[in-house]
Image: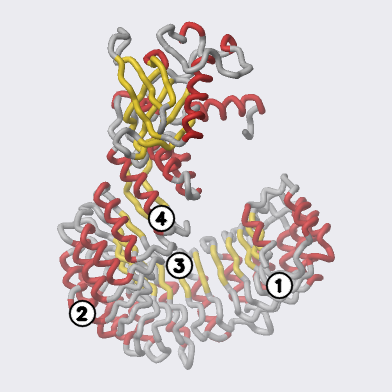
Amino acid sequence: RRGIPKIEAYRACTDIIMRLPFFGMTFFDVKDEEGYDSLLAISEKGIYVFDTKSLHLRTFITFNYLKTWMKTLHGVIIEYYEDLEFTKTIQLSLFASHIKQKEILDLLNELFFLLPEEMRLETIIPTIDHPNIIADASLFLPPVITDFVSYRFDSRLEYMKAYYMEACSRSKPIRKFCQQLDDAIDNNQMYHIIDLSNCKLTLQRFKIVVAAIIATARYYPPNKDIFRENIDIEVVNLSNNTLTPESMHILNSLLIEYPDIREINISGSIIQNSGALTLSSWMTKLMNIRSIKFCNCGIGNKGFAHLIESSGKGRACLETLQFASNQISNKSCIEFLPHFLEDHDSIIDLDISFNKLNEKGFRALIPVLSKSQVFQVLNLSGNLFTAAFALDLTKFVQLSKTIRVLIVQQCKIAASSFPLLAEALRESKSIEEIDLSKNPLGSGLEEVDVHFRWISELPSLRSLSIASCSFNEVHGEFISKAICEADSLEKLDVSDNVFSNNGQLSANWGSLLQSHDMLTHFTCSNCNLTSGATIFTNLASSMSSSLTHLDLSGNPIEDVSFLIKYLSSGEDHLEYLNLSDCQLSTTLCQSLFMDGLSSSPQALQTLVFNNNLADFHTWYAEFIASLKSNPYLETLYIRETGIFPSKEQRELLDKEDHLSLTKRMQSFYAK
C-alpha cells in the first residue's frame, strides 16, 4: 500500500478479492447421481456444480429458480424450476456425508433468509421457517456480482491463475510462477515466458503447472467479446531443477499445445538419453524453435543425435545450440553434427564445452563453422584436448570471418603454440570477446612483447579473460601496456596470475586504470596483492575512469587506507566492490566501514565481504551506524565473517527500515 492511504489500500484489496472467480463460494465435495466426483459451491448468487478435475461448470441455479431443498438418506435433493413460468421442475440429487448434508442445508437456508425481500420469491419453500441467525436481511444489498460465473474471467491469464491455485489446494503453489502471472495481469501485459528456473520442481508440481497451462489453452470463453487473449508462450525455462527422464512426457504435452515456442531450456536436469529420446519425438513440431539449451543433462551421443535431428527438420531459424557438460564425444562431431550445421546455416551460437571431444572432433567442425556467414559464438572449454588443439584453433581463427566470441578455457593451450595463435588473433577483425583462462600460456613464454600486441590491435575487443594462465610480473608489464592501447575493452579478468611486485601492481596498471575511459569491469582476484595503493590512488586521481565493478577477492590485503581515501574522495564511480577472502582483520574492517562507508559514497551499491577475519560482535553498534549513514548501499554480503550477531542484534538490524538492503542480507546470518 506504499504511497496511498490505509483505507484506500483496504478498498483496493477488497475490490481485487471480489473480482476473484470463486469469491464468496463455499465448496463441498459430493457425488452426482452417476457416482462421479463433483464440487458443489454455494454463494449468495445461488448454487454451482463443477467437475472436480477440470472445474468445468456443469450446473448453475440462481435463488429465484429454486423451489426447495431437502435432506435424503444419502445426500440432498435440490429442486428447481426449468424456467420462470414455474411450471416444470427438475431435481438435482447429490450424495454427501451426514455432516455435509446438514452444512449444505443450513447454508442454503441462511443465504435465502439474508436475501433482500424482493429477491425471496414466495414459490421457494425452505426446509425451516427461519434460520437461527442474528443478522437482519434488511441490512444486506443485492448480490454484488450478477453476471454468469464464467464471465468473471476477463482474460485467459486470469483463468490460468484460478485453475492453478485451485489445483494447488493440496500442495504448495510455486511462488515464482504465481508472481509472473500476477505481474502480467496487473500490468495488462502479454504472457510470453514460462520461467520456472531454480524452483525445485518435483514431478507432481510440474504436472500441476503443465495441467493448468494446457487447460488454459483449451478453455473456451462463453463470451469472446469481453475476453482478452493475453497468452503467447515463446520461452520455456526449466533450468536448474531436478526433472527426471519420465517428466519429459509431461513437457511433450506442453509442446503439443504451444508449437510456436522459440526457446527451451532444461539445463541442470539429468534427463539422460532416454529423456532426450522422449523429448525429440515432439521437438519436430516446434517449427519456430530458435534456441535449445540442454546443458548438464547427462545426454550422450545417442540422445544428442536424436535431439539435433528432430530440432533441425524443416527449420531455417535455429540459432542457438547449448549442450555443455554432457557426455558428447568425437562420434557426434564427426558423423552427423557437421552435416547438420551445413544444412542449417542459421546457427549463431554453439556451446559444446566440458564434453568428451578432442582435437579430432573439433577438426571435423572447422570447415563448416569457418564457412558460415552468421556463426559468431563458440565455446569449447574443458574438453579432452591435447597440445595439438592449439594448431586447429589457430586454423579456425584464420579461416573464420564472423566469429565474435571465443571461449577456450582449460584447453591445454601451451606457451609453445601460443605465438601462432597470437598471430592469428592479430589478423582477426571480428573477435569481440575472448576467454583463454586456465591455459598454461605463460609457462616458458619468451619475447612477450610481440605475443600480446593482438590485444591492442583487435579493433572491437570488448572482453578479455586471461585468468590462471601462469603469467608473471614481466608478462604483466607488456599485457598492461597492450591493454592501455585497447580502446574498446570494457571487461578484463587477470585473476590467479602473479602480476604484483612486493604486493602491489606496477605503474603500468595504474596508468591503465587512470586513463582507460571504456573499462568498466576489472577482476584481479588471487594475485597476491597486499595493498590496493596502485589501483585506488590512480582511480582517485582519474578524471575519466569508467570503472564500476572491481573484484580484489582472495588477495591478502594489509592496508585499506588507499581504499578509504578513495571512497571518501567523493570522486568514486564504483558500483560493485568484492573484498571476499582478503584476510581483513577486525581493525581493518572497522576502519573501512566506519571511515570509508560512513562518508556515503553514492555510487557503491554492492559490497561483497565474505570470509574475512573480522569480529563484528565486538563493534556491532558501530557497524549498524556505518550502514545507517550510507543509504545508497543496497546489497551487502558478509557470509562466514567473524562472529555472528545474536538474536537481539539481528532484530535490531531487521527493524532498520530506512536501510534499503535487499533480502540477500540474510546471507549475513547464514552459517
Q: What is the crowding at mark 1: few (fewer than 14 residues within 10 Å), some, or many (at least 20)?
A: many
Q: Amino acid at mark 3?
A: Ser
Q: Identify the disc placed on residue 334.
A: 2
Which residue position is annotated with label 3? 463
User: In the rendered image, which quarter is residue 457 located in?
Assistant: bottom left
Along the line of sight, the residue nearer the viewer: 500 or 46: 46
* Residue 409, image x, y percentages: 42, 78
Residue beneath the point at 78% across and 55% down = 624
User: In the rendered image, which quarter is residue 420 located in?
Assistant: bottom left
- Is there CB contact under 8 Å for labels 3 and 1? no
User: In the rendered image, which quarter is residue 436 located in?
Assistant: bottom left
Which of label 4 and label 1 is nearer to you? Answer: 4
* Residue 610, image x, y percentages: 66, 68
Q: Amino acid at mark 4?
A: Gln
Q: What is the crowding at mark 2: few (fewer than 14 residues within 10 Å), some, or many (at least 20)?
A: some
Q: Amino acid at mark 1?
A: Asn
Split into 4 quadrants, where in the image is the N terminus? top right
Residue beneath the point at 43% across and 83% down = 451
Vertical arrangement, residue 558 with respect to residue 115, above or below: below
- Is there CB contact under 8 Å for labels 4 and 3? no
* Residue 575, image x, y percentages: 61, 57
Secondary structure beneath disc 1?
loop
Which of label 2 and label 4 is nearer to you? Answer: 4
Which residue position is annotated with label 4? 204
Tell me which label, 2 or 4, sits earlier in the chain: 4
Split into 4 quadrants, where in the image is the C terminus? bottom right
Which residue position is annotated with label 1? 612
Query: Is residue 404 visible to the viewer in this orientation of the structure?
Result: no
Measure the C-alpha gap from mark 2 to mark 3: 31 Å
Q: What is the crowding at mark 4: few (fewer than 14 residues within 10 Å), some, or many (at least 20)?
A: few
